[in-house]
Image: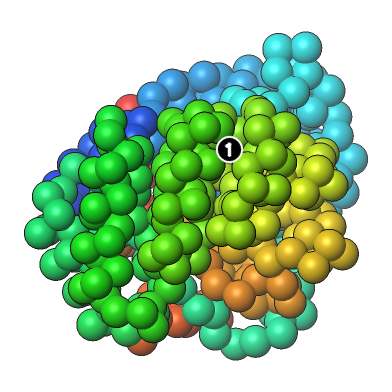
Amino acid sequence: MKITNVETYLLDIPLKQRAITDSQTRLESVEFVAVRLDTDEGINGWGFNWNYTKGTRAVQAIIDDTYAPKLIGKDPLMYKTVLRELHYTNHFIGQVGITRVALCAVELAFWDIKLKVANLPLWKYLGPMKDKVKAYNTDGGWLQVTTDELIKDMTALVERGYDAVKMKLGLPDPREDFKRVKAVRKAIGDDIKLMVDVNTVWDLKTSKVWGRKLEELDVYWLEEPMNPFDKKAHAELAQSLDLPIAIGETIYTKYDFRDYIEMGAVDIVQADATKLSGIDEWLDVAALARCYNLEVIPHTNVQQKLHAQLAAATPNVPMVEHCYESIADIWEDPIKVVNGYYTLPDEPGLGCKLTDKVLTEYRIG
Ligand SMILES: [Mg+2]
């Protein structure tokens, strides 16, 4: 089998819900790069990557200008050697960041071809441990809503069957954050897991002081309290708190996860295959975490179908994030959550193709 054509799509897909904010970003749309690899045997593979800030045109350029010429004529079933070549194509301009985001999109397209050849969905190909996967929900906890709206949104999720929910922190005054967590805890009761996410804006002292306070409210984890480059600060924080520290959505290599784990700087590993170089590296991280008795609870916003399938085949993944429900229908056969559990797909392949309507309507390049 040989690759005969590489097609990329740059997309800007608006969120249908109200604009939402976390401590860093006001989110109104999600940019995508979708990749289609065509082969001489009529099978094609779809991969993607996403970005809820801007600048995805650079990712598309990496694929079109530096990867595509090297992909033509290659055997997609020998993809690991191909990916290695692609990595060294542009590693002087970026070992991580946009080059890895681009590499992942291609890796996912290779997996889609491999799974279509095997005639299996990802989770069955990997060898599942379970046939449904627990979801926790982040869509009720955005930062811009009033405390009354927050309580309404979070309790609505619990009523829909979620027993684990997450809310955003990182307001200018942490005392306001604390009051909101307290109000939500009171509203949802003691039996629901409640996680908080700072999106990296606190410093070490703030994280220590307010992390200790959050323990009083039985918070299940404190997510991305600080700059993810500062592993030493995370190690010191983890030493000083009983509250588990969760991090991973802005960590781009398995070597960084190794360092975090060995330094005792992370309790919940939130590895995201779309920030790593794809499925293979995610599986490496999950295996590494398992050796250290750590749980992996993948970060997602649009890539739930990928991670729910990985979770089904990985013993140390107890649940997977769910959010951005307003745009779930951008995917063909979108994954559903019923009573707090993901329903896994049956169709062969990765199952991560955007609909033709989305590929046409929101294409910007
Ligand atoms: Mg997060």
Q: Is residue 196 visible?
A: yes
The residue sitting at 18% across, 58% down in the picture is: 150
Query: Residue 131's quadrant in the figure?
Result: bottom right
The residue sitting at 78% across, 29% down in the picture is: 86
Residue 8 location in percent, x, y? Answer: 51, 34
Residue that label 1 marks:
250
Residue 215 vertical placement versus 342 (above, below): above
Q: Is residue 79 visible?
A: no
| Quadrant of image for the C terminus | top left
Is 22 situated left or right of 354 in this image? Answer: left
Badge 1 marks a residue whose secondary structure is loop
Q: Nearer the viewer, residue 55 or 140?
A: 140
Is 151 situated left or right of 342 in this image? Answer: left
Pointer 1 local density, CA inside 10 Å: few below 14, some 14–19, many at least 20: some
Q: Nearer the viewer, residue 155 or 80?
A: 155
The residue sitting at 36% across, 79% down in the picture is: 190
Residue 216 location in percent, x, y? Answer: 42, 63
Residue 92 vertical placement versus 327 (above, below): above
Is 335 situated left or right of 248 in this image? Answer: left
The disc labelled 1 sits on which kind of residue? Thr
